[in-house]
């Protein structure tokens, strides 16, 4: 956990920032003969992002790539804050903080590779997917047991919401009769 000094409390997180390739996907990039990119997303990650939003919490995606497959999926999930084609994720994060009047310590970031380091170093709760690069794992205060694209986002969201005592409320956004704890 070198290089990270900000106190971390999952309880205070109000906003979730995500990378895409290696976090929402397994990091593979598929292209057809016409050069159209396709991506594979895990349905539980999508359900978790819907729960998060339904609780009134914010989501942003900051990615270095552009692609219609991602835009279609994020639109389907209702993610409004999308920065694609970012050459400097740290700068994009700072602009997002200003635009949305957020404090960095209220934001969790889920990342997997070195382009995510500037955000992970600055945010309130740096999260790594299981198969992240060593540099990201070194900064993370929570590491998922699942690999990117395989339910890691769901696991991270569940971790945060359970720490906040809001998991049962999140589940009730799909099943109003759910009576489980937390």
Image (cartoon, rainbow, N blue to C red):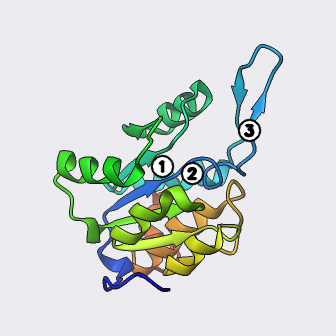
**Secondary element at tag 2:** helix
The residue depicted at 71 percent of the width and 20 percent of the height is: 36
Q: Earlier in the sequence, mark 2 or mark 3?
A: 3
The residue depicted at 51 percent of the width and 62 percent of the height is: 110
Q: Separation of disc 3 and disc 1 at Cα?
A: 25 Å
Above or below residue 14? Residue 37 is: above
Q: Which residue is mark 1?
A: 50
> Residue 28's image quarter?
top right
Judge left or right: residue 71 versus residue 15.
right
Residue 40 appearing in the image: yes
Nearer to me, 74 or 47: 74
**Residue 29 - label:** 3
**Label 1 environment density (alpha carbons within 10 Å; few <14, some 14–19, many ≥20):** many
Residue 46 spot, x, y in % from top left: 58, 48
Q: Which residue is mark 2?
A: 47
Nearer to me, 176 or 119: 119
Nearer to me, 116 or 26: 116
């Amino acid at each position: 956990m070198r290089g990270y000094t900000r106190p971390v409390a999952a309880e205070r997180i109000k906003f979730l920032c995500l990378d895409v390739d290696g976090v929402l996907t397994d990091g593979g990039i598929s292209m057809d003969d016409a050069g159209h990119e396709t991506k594979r997303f895990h349905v539980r990650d999508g359900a978790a992002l819907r729960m998060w939003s339904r609780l009134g919490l914010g989501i942003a995606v900051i990615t270095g790539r552009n692609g219609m497959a991602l835009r279609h999926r994020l639109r389907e999930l209702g993610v409004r804050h999308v920065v694609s084609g970012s050459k400097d994720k740290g700068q994009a994060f700072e602009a997002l903080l200003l635009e949305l009047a957020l404090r960095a310590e209220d934001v969790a970031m889920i990342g997997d590779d070195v382009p995510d380091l500037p955000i992970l170093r600055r945010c309130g709760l740096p999260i790594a997917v299981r198969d992240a690069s060593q540099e990201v794992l070194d900064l993370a205060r929570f590491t998922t047991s699942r690999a990117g694209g395989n339910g890691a986002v769901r696991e991270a969201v569940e971790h945060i919401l359970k720490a906040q005592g809001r998991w049962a409320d999140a589940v009730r956004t799909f099943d109003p009769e759910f009576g489980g704890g937390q």
